[in-house]
Every structure is written in C-alpha cells, then in structure tokens.
Image (cartoon, rainbow, N blue to C red):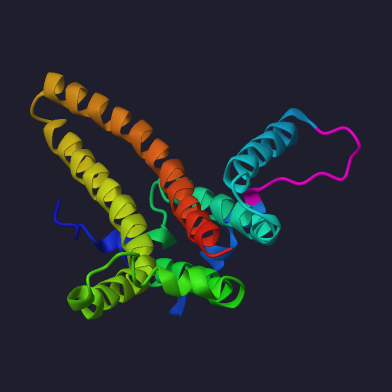
Amino acid sequence: MNENLFASFAAPTILGLPAAVLIILFPPLLVPTSKHLINNRLITTQQWLIQLTSKQMMTMHNTKGRTWSLMLVSLIIFIATTNLLGLLPHSFTPTTQLSMNLAMAIPLWAGTVVMGFRFKTKNALAHFLPQGTPTPLIPMLIIIETISLFIQPMALAVRLTANITAGHLLMHLIGSATLALSTISLPSTLIIFTILILLTVLEIAVALIQAYVFTLLVSLYLHDNT
C-alpha cells in the first residue's frame, strides 16, 4: 500500500541502462506474418482488420493522401499493441510518456502541414483568416488560428497520455483496495474485484479506441492538407 502510484510509469532500466527502446521495438514482433499461399485463421483475421481499418481511414483521401496508408496502418497497430501490452502486470506502457507521444505527434503533424503549404498553399493560408471576417478582428483571428494550428500535436499527445495514464491509475487504486479488503470483508472484496474485471475490459476497449482516435485525427489533418 505504500507503493508510489506513479512508480509503474517510470522508465525501466536493465543494468542501469534504459530499456524503453527495447520495449518500444517489442510490439511489432507480436504481429504475425506469413509467406504461405494459404494463411491460417489468425493471419486472415489480422489482414481483414487491417484492410477494414485502412479502407475506413483512406476512403476520404485523394491519391496523395493515400500514399500515407502504410504509415497510418503501422501507426495504429503500434499504438494498439503498445497499449494492450501495458495492461499486463508489471509491464511498462510507453504511451503513458508524454515525450514519446509528442515524438509521434509532432513529425506526423508537421508532415501534413508541410504538404498543405506545398500542394494547397492558398487553402492552407486561407485557414488563418475565415472569409467575411471584419477588418478590426483580422489580427486577432490570425493569432488565434495560428495558436490553434500549433496546438494540434500537443492535443494529440496529451489526449493519448491522459487517457492511458488515467486508466492505469484507476486500475492500480482499485487493485490496491481489493487487496486491502481481502482480509476484512469477503463480500466487499468480491464486489470490488468484479468492478476491477469490468474496468479491465473497459481499458482494453480504451486502448484500442485511443489508437484509432490518434490515427484518425492524423488522417483528418492529412485530409485537410492534401
């Protein structure tokens, strides 16, 4: 009970060396691949899910936007597997680190903005000043729109970090309460343990949904700039 609530969010080390890089590289190894002509059920289900997700995100894009399909599919698989692995006991979730989420969000956001200024310069500049704006409000609106543009990668990273961290903290608190009540009241322990199981199921859904939301927002930024 005296354990620090945020101890599980500290970057792990092996022999004094940071192990975060190894943990980040581990999830792609869990995605099975096959070179056989006829795939098994796992590979077939995986390919169906990838095709479904890719089709849903890429339908609204033009030819230039669809060149990002491989990157976006890889992104959603990486975030989803990382979030799910973080639900295992005594594991580390890289997506609870704001620095890592910013490292994913900023380059992707910057890439979409650069594409917008390169291929749709007039439309990109038009976003800074809505049509029909009164003259006295033009400087203020330009400042507001500029701030809203630069806040997008921060919103992406903070949203993912906050949702994953909050879920882990809540599971930790309820798990600690279950252990504390196990020697006091058995009915209360069973009730809280049931809540913990339901919360775990909810966190599995949140892990997948947050991966989809992160990737979908990047896809929308891309759509606005291509």
* Residue at (43% x, 42% y) in the render: 209
Tell me: 135 left or right of 47: left
Magenta-drawn stretch contains 36: yes
Tell me: 40 left or right of 226: right
Specify the farthest residue to the left: 184
How many discs appear?
0
* Residue at (25% x, 73% y) in the render: 141
Q: Is residue 186 above or below residue 49?
A: above
Residue 73 location, x and y as percent? 62, 52
Magenta residues span: 30-39
Residue 223 location, x and y as percent? 54, 57
Specify the farthest residue to the right: 37
Magenta-drawn stretch contains 63: no
Residue nearest the viewer, comparing 21 with 210: 210
Which quadrant holds residue 101?
Answer: bottom left
Residue nearest the viewer, comparing 92 with 151: 151
* Residue at (59% x, 59% y) in the render: 26
Residue nearest the viewer, comparing 150 with 39: 150
Specify the farthest residue to the top: 187
Residue 3 location, x and y as percent? 19, 57
